[in-house]
Image (cartoon, grey):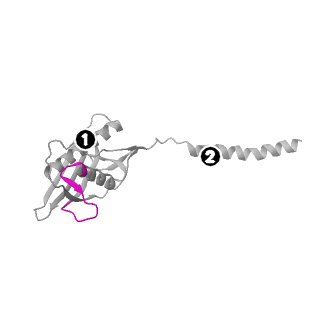
Amino acid sequence: MKISKHFAVFCLLPAILAINACSGLTQSDRPATNTWWLEPYTDMSGLPSSDPALLVAVSVTVVPGLDTDRILTLSQKSQLNHYSGARWADNLPELLTSMVTRTIQASPRFELAAGGPEDCNLRLEVQEFFALIGSSAATTAVSVAMEGQFHCGQNKPVSLKLNASVPISDDRMSAIVAAFQQAVDGVMRDMLERL
């Protein structure tokens, strides 16, 4: 009987150790990843309309370093980093392409050209889309900048330089994302006024 008890304990010990080891795989000290959403700009009050609406093809690219779904930071020493546990709903090129196209679709002046012949082309390159970090390692502002060109038929192309900087006094992620939303809204409204 003693031999069978020792044998049972000997067999149970590895099973208990394996269960304890596996339980560590389901727990982590890292914070959960939060996914953040931005809305397209849709307030078209005060903007002119055209009849019929112009068909627009949209192209949005980003400079190297911005092709990520992470919410990026830029220090005063030009160090590009990101907030841990915080991501956008998609990689920045896809996210901003969606934002621009949905903004264009909300305008009464334009319709999105879906694979057919277009009246106009809108090309944008995103050059800044990050939170600025001050010397005290606190977020001081959000910066969004785009450059591009809008070209319709035989008309002279319109050069676009769009930028917005929104100061931040609250380091909570919700406040930082709200500042990004405010900056994107400002850039999109400025873009629509220039088209």
Quadrant in the picture for residue 175: top left
| Residue 18 seen | yes
Could you say where residue 46 lies in the image, as x and y percent from the top left?
A: 14, 42
Badge 1: residue crowd in 10 Å (few <14, some 14–19, many ≥20):
many
User: SS at mark 1?
Assistant: helix
Residue most extreme to the top: 170
Mark 1: amino acid: Gln
Q: State the extent of the magenta-drawn residues as a range.
A: 105-121
Q: Quadrant of residue 133?
A: top left
The residue where tag 2 is placed is: 22
Q: Which residue is drawn at 31% across and 56% down?
A: 93
Q: Is residue 147 above or below residue 21?
A: below
Amino acid type for the residue under numbered disc 2 = Cys
Left or right: where 94 falls relative to 47: right
Image quarter where the N terminus lies is: top right
Image position of 154 (left or right of 181)? left
Residue 133 seen anywhere in this rendered image of the structure: no
In percent of the image, x 23 and y 55: which residue is there?
A: 111
Q: Mark 1 points at which residue?
A: 182
- The correct choice, above or below, for 52 with respect to 76 in the image is below
Pinpoint residue 141: horizontal percent, then vertical percent.
25, 41
